[in-house]
Image (cartoon, grey):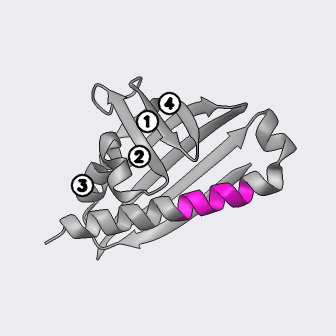
Amino acid sequence: MLVERSVDIDAAPDTVWDVLVDVAGWPGWNPAVKSATLDGAFAEGSQFRWKSGGSTISSTIERADRPHVAGWRGKTLGARARHVWRLEPTAGGTRVTTEESMSGLVPRLFSGWMTRTLETSLDVWIAGMSEAAERRTP
């Protein structure tokens, strides 16, 4: 299963990047994230744990190319996920494209429901991140 979303944000790529990689700050702009803790800096190989939708997710950062690409993999309750964010400068700010893929028993058994849930989740992520980044822009 793979879901992708894009949005144009009226903020510079560095500003969007700072919002995205501040894992501990996610609950402040993403209502679906109840808590998040990162062990160390946002760097390849670093790990973080977060709670979302009643699940605790253990994730490992796979990509940290400031301010272009961030990505991580994670697992919870019979599902494995990969989440990638691409930031591209535009004349007015940043084009953000995010995609998440899921595999495992739960996504296979409940593919329709999981796809709809993932679509809603990504919509919440990009809306919250857009608002948070634009608030930081003078």
- Say whether residue 10 is left or right of residue 31: left
Marking on residue 69: 2
**Which percent across, then down, holds residue 86?**
44, 53
Disc 1 target residue: 63
Q: Earlier in the sequence, mark 1 or mark 3?
A: 3
Q: Is residue 29 left or right of residue 56?
A: left
Rendered view: 122 above or below 11: above
Q: Of label 4 and label 2, which has the lower sequence position? A: 4
Say whether residue 73 is left or right of residue 134. right
| Residue tagged 3 | 14
User: How far is mark 2 from mark 3, CA to CA?
Assistant: 11 Å
Residue located beneath label 4 in the image:
59
Residue 31 position by quadrant: bottom left
Q: Residue at x 41, y 23 (%)?
A: 45
Neighbours of disc 3 within 10 Å: few (<14), some (14-19), many (20+)? some
User: Mark 4 is on which residue type?
Assistant: Ser
Q: Is residue 90 visible?
A: no
Q: CA distance from mark 1 to mark 3?
A: 16 Å
